[in-house]
Image (spheres, grey):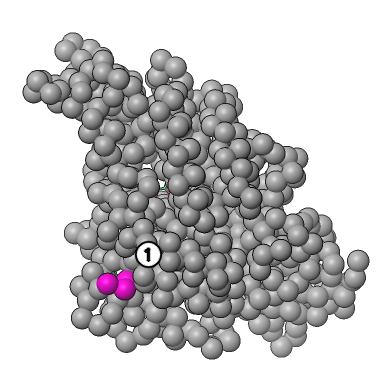
């Protein structure tokens, strides 16, 4: 059994807590203002001491960085801004020595427009074999001046861009569900399938423990590329509800599952089987669970939980349906409260909690924020998440309770969503601001002395939220997370398994996990008594003098029951 295997030899990933490293913003060792592999290596003991089991590192491959590295120019190398392949191998060694697994991020839907395949496709012209690895089509209308269909880019505007042919004339169009610099691959092409298999093996052979799969639900497009008909930009959530399940022309199509069956076979061919987690913004847990059937992927982010407002019924419904659908296929649920694409929980929960979406910054425009309340709720939500059966992902900086930086100056914004939306949506930079390690002013220990300024400016509040400031303060969000992760590791009821809902007053979620663990989440606006006969293990906010749990708080309890 390896140091991070679960109880009784259960596969480690079924109950793991995985820390998401947004490398560019984690720690900068070489002083260029941007995080790197050596910076991450230098902070690995912080992650070990935090108590996580594994890391997921956002793409570190050579990239023009039009979309923060999700525009990959070479899948089997490391961008010099992040380091070298040797640095990556040293990181894997160090992490493993500390008992931490490492997942990378694979981007199969699209490459960068600077990938050799796409450059060759542009140079080779219409009808060439090189173009068949992507989705090139003639335009519609007189002179082919109109895009081939009505599909919209997730970042805004048409999902098609017209190329200038080698003879200098305007020619074919190519599909890109994201930025124009991210051309979609054609997954019916055997080269595409073979090359990704090669990439998986390349990293698995170097000891990588698994992959997060970027937009896992988008790879396969309906033959003939018919119009979607909605005319609306889909953001990251699908516009699939308008379509019968599995029939949307480019989201969550049935054929994509064959790809993951092949990938599963690759992962299983290793002596220590490797794992996958899917990023699939599909229409509800039932569709999601299809990605984690026994011969497909191991896990998939449960985004229904992430997008749920801080309201008891909504949270319970998200948790219940996710657990139910995963149990039906024998997979553990995978919980997540945020990532590098979504507004930080502190800022999301600082708003009035309605059914209106609140996970993108533009959703929050004009909605007043109470950040203290948002922080209480985010702390409570973290304890809820870490008490649920299955595995959980923790996005860097959430362990510090960082808020979204909502007021970055416009001239520093880098997210392609900002430009492609015609400046209607500020995009996702506000959750990607470099971490504060020490207080005392920028770069807050992110870079060494004398370095270039961080790639995104850090706000003054970073000083009081810095790691060094929170370290050792029992009231801090960092220490709350450390305590929760410590307990989670040692408590036999936590991690993989099941839960039992308990009766609770309106606005309160209560569940038990065997043996002897109880969780009470007070989502109401009044204090509630802790159950008689239970002992408090940990709370996101201390109970009042009368032993009652305040609003927006979660308590972990020892119920004394032993199986
Ligand atoms: C995923 C990534 C996001 C990226 C997009 C396109 O949703 O998480 O950051 O922009 O895919 O690759």
Judged from the image, the secondary structure of the residue bearing numbered disc 1 is helix
Task: Tell me which corner region of the image, top left, top right, bottom left or bottom right, holds residue 8.
Answer: bottom right
Give residue 478's position: percent from left, percent from top: 53, 78
Q: Is 241 left or right of 290, judged from the image as shown?
A: left
Q: Is 450 left or right of 48, judged from the image as shown?
A: left
Task: Tell me which corner region of the image, top left, top right, bottom left or bottom right, holds residue 187.
Answer: top left
Give residue 429's position: percent from left, percent from top: 33, 58
Q: Is residue 218 above or below residue 14?
A: above
Q: Residue at x 74, y 79 (%)?
A: 537
Q: Which residues are magenta?
A: 26-30
Q: Residue at x 25, y 73 (%)?
A: 31
Q: Quadrant of the N terminus?
A: bottom right
State the residue position of label 1: 87
Q: Is 499 left or right of 527, judged from the image as shown?
A: right
Q: Residue at x 26, y 54 (%)?
A: 414
Does residue 460 belong to the magenta stretch?
no
Q: Residue at x 22, y 33 (%)?
A: 119
Does residue 29 belong to the magenta stretch?
yes
Camera sees residue 380: no
Give residue 138's position: percent from left, percent from top: 25, 16
Magenta portion: prevailing SS class:
loop
Give residue 505's position: percent from left, percent from top: 77, 63
Q: Is mark 1 within 8 Å of ligand 1?
A: no
């Amino acid at each position: 059994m390896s140091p991070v295997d679960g109880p009784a030899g259960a596969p480690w990933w079924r109950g793991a807590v995985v820390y998401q490293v947004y490398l560019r913003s984690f720690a900068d060792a070489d002083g260029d203002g941007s995080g790197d592999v050596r910076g991450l290596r230098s902070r690995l003991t912080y992650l070990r001491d935090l108590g996580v089991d594994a890391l997921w590192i956002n793409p570190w491959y050579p990239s023009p960085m039009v979309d923060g590295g999700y525009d990959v120019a070479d899948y089997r190398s490391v961008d010099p801004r992040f380091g070298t392949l040797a640095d990556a191998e040293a990181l894997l060694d160090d992490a493993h020595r500390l008992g931490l697994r490492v997942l990378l991020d694979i981007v199969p839907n699209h490459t960068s427009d600077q990938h050799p395949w796409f450059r060759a496709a542009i140079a080779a012209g219409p009808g060439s074999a090189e173009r068949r690895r992507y989705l090139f089509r003639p335009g519609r209308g007189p002179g082919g001046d109109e895009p081939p269909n009505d599909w919209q880019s997730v970042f805004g505007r048409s999902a098609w861009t017209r190329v200038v042919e080698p003879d200098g004339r305007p020619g074919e169009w190519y599909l890109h569900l994201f930025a124009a610099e991210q051309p979609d691959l054609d997954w019916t092409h055997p080269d595409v399938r073979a090359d990704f298999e090669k990439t998986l093996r390349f990293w698995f052979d170097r000891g990588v423990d698994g992959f997060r799969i970027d937009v896992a639900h988008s790879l396969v497009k309906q033959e003939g590329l018919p119009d979607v008909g909605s005319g609306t930009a889909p953001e990251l959530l699908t516009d699939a509800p308008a379509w019968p399940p599995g029939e949307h022309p480019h989201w969550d199509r049935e054929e994509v599952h064959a790809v993951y069956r092949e990938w599963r076979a690759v992962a299983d061919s290793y002596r220590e089987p490797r794992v996958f987690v899917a990023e699939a913004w599909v229409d509800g847990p039932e569709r999601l669970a299809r990605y984690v059937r026994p011969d497909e992927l191991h896990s998939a982010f449960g985004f229904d939980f992430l997008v749920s407002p801080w309201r008891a019924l909504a949270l319970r419904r998200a948790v219940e349906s996710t657990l139910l659908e995963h149990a039906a296929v024998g997979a553990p649920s995978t919980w997540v409260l945020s990532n590098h694409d979504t507004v930080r929980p502190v800022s999301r929960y600082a708003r009035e909690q309605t059914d209106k979406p609140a996970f993108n910054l533009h959703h929050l425009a004009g909605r007043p924020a109470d950040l203290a309340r948002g922080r209480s709720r985010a702390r409570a939500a973290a304890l809820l998440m870490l008490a649920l059966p299955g595995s959980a992902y923790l996005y860097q900086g959430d362990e510090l309770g960082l808020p979204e930086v909502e007021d970055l100056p416009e001239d520093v914004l880098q997210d392609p969503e900002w430009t492609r939306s015609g400046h209607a949506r500020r995009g996702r930079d506000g959750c990607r601001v470099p971490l504060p390690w020490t207080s005392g002013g920028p770069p807050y220990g992110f870079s060494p002395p004398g370095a270039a300024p961080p790639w995104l400016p850090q706000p003054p509040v970073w000083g009081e939220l810095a790691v060094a400031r929170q370290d050792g303060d029992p009231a801090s969000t960092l220490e709350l997370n450390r305590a929760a992760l410590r307990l989670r590791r040692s408590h036999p009821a936590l991690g993989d398994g099941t839960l039992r809902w308990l009766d609770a007053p309106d606005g309160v979620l209560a569940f038990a996990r065997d043996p002897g663990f109880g969780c009470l989440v007070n989502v109401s606006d009044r204090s509630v008594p802790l159950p008689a006969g239970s002992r408090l293990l940990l709370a996101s906010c201390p109970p009042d003098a009368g032993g009652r749990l305040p609003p927006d708080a979660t308590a972990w309890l020892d119920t004394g029951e032993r199986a």
